[in-house]
Image (cartoon, rainbow, N blue to C red):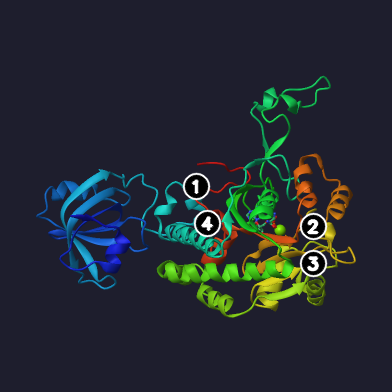
Amino acid sequence: MEFRRVADILKNGQPEEAVVVKGWVRTKRELKGFAFTEVNDGSSLAGLQVVLDSDIPDYEANLKQINTGASIEVTGTLVASQGKGQKIELKADTVIIYGEADPETYPLQKKRHSFEFLREISHLRSRTNTLGAVFRVRNACATAIHQFFQEKGFLWIHTPIITASDCEGAGELFTVTNFNLDKLPQDKEGKIDYSQDFFGKPAYLTVSGQLQVEAMAMAFQNVYTFGPTFRAENSNTSRHLAEFWMIEPEMAFCDLEGDQNLAEEFLKYIFQYVLDNCPEDIEFFNKWINKSLLETANNIMSNEFERVTYTKAVELLEKASKKFEFPVEWGIDLQSEHERYLAEELFKKPVIVTNYPKGIKAFYMRLDEGEKTVSAMDVLAPGIGEIIGGSQREERLDILERRIQEMNIEADSLWWYLDLRRYGSVPHAGFGLGFERLVQFITGMANIRDVIPFPRTPDNADF
Ligand code: 4AD
Ligand code: MG
């Protein structure tokens, strides 16, 4: 008797095969002399229909316990299904109940629940159709990402989670200490004495693995990180998390154009992979979450991304200035409404904006000729806005030192980063893709809290 996953049975199962299935009950229907139950094991959107005849052992007792949410094992034989929808179902010989779920208290019932409500039960919500599909697609995205880079010979680098440097310089750091906050060691003047703390100096959760992955690119040429990053950003939006995953490729001997080419090829590859590997889940999203999802996907696959400089983008935005709440002028950081206008209304496809004013970007970006702009790029996606941020890095020691000074950046923790410009420096470039924004983009899910199993946002570190 073979233990089989539901996805495999629905795809490959043949009548008369004897199988064992384990999973959670989604529904139960009692009729005269028999009952149906649908068992879902997370391997596919659809569950497997199980037919229970009243002549199986302990029929009445089992039936009482087969309620939505209960965990069961069914041994039986596959038979051609009479009903529409599925071609195969399981005729039970025996049933084992592992764990009951009291229908009076089990929070997930057959009706549709709001995403807000489901967030309050993040430990159970993956048993719903939508969240189940989200996390299967999330898994497929992660697989596609590794496959893409491994096929290209990029080395996967595990960058540290705890670091002394603020890569983005935005001051959104979570401090790491081994002291209780009310017992922080103080010096004579009452200031916090970090020399007594675990690392002997201030340490933080990383906001980006970029600085370290740059060092590794200077040994392996093409590398990437894929790990959690943390930002104490106090923005309660549908696109921000305090803990999110980021993919950061870095390429030596590469400029901003090569960086843009990689970003475009990369996004198209992941989309194609998910369409090929999760067709049912994508159909589901297209039907229930965003009716133009498949159209958007085809559009992304079959068109080149638009590429414009920041200066050009501002000109285009100025022409539509009446549409915006935030006034547009050269030098501003593009707001969400500006980004979405470019990607959704004007170009109707992903747009790569390059060469931003140096004043609004990080210290490590390469200074352009004329010194007004830097070799930065943001990829703006329809429905999302910024999905990727990247740049060609400043490889010239003197200019990098000058920029660090101009921007009043605390340089002590960056001595090693400057060393990379002292010894065998080369032009190099990379970017960061927000993993959850990618999953939002591919599924059409409106809120970033619904594409990560246990979201961390201001005032919420539950579960
Ligand atoms: O644009 P960002 O800040 O770029 C960096 O961190 C660079 N060091 C990347 C690099 O060049 N290696 O962040 C990159 C991406 C954004 O485009 C966005 O998709 C995502 O990370 N991101 C967030 N996602 C969810 N919640 C947040 N609070 C995010 N902040 C950034
Ligand atoms: Mg950015």
Point out the frontmost of discs 3 and 4: 3
Q: Which residue is mark 1?
A: 120
For residue 360, which quarter of the picture? Answer: bottom right
Q: Residues within 10 Å of mark 3 (few under 14, many from 20)?
A: many
Q: Callout 1 environment at 10 Å: few (<14), some (14 to 19), or many (20+)? A: few
Does 301 sit left or right of 428 as displayed?
left
Q: Secondary structure at mark 4?
A: loop
**Of callouts 2 and 1, which one flags the residue occurring earlier in the amino acid sequence?**
1
Q: At label 1, which amino acid type do we have? A: Glu
For disc 2, the neighbor class at 10 Å (few under 14, some 14 to 19, many from 20) is many
Residue under label 3: 355
Q: Quadrant of the N terminus?
A: bottom left
Q: Is residue 87 visible?
A: yes
Label 2 to label 1, Cα distance in Å? 45 Å
Q: The residue tagged with tag 3: helix, strand or loop?
A: loop
Mark 2 close to ligand 1, CB under 8 Å: no
Residue hosting label 4: 451
Front residue of this view, candidates 30 and 303: 303
- The residue that appears at 74% across and 26% down in the rendered structure is 195
Q: Earlier in the sequence, mark 2 or mark 4?
A: 2
x then y, percent, for residue 96: 20, 47
The residue lying furthest to the top in this view is 188
244 relative position to 87: left or right: right
Q: Is residue 74 left or right of residue 381?
A: left
Residue designated by label 2 = 394
387 w.r.t. 207: above or below: below
Image height of 199 relative to 332, above or below: above
Q: CA distance from mark 3 to mark 1?
A: 42 Å
Work out whether residue 247 can be spotted: no
Q: Which percent across, then down, holds residue 2?
A: 21, 56
**Which amino acid type is marked by label 3?**
Asn
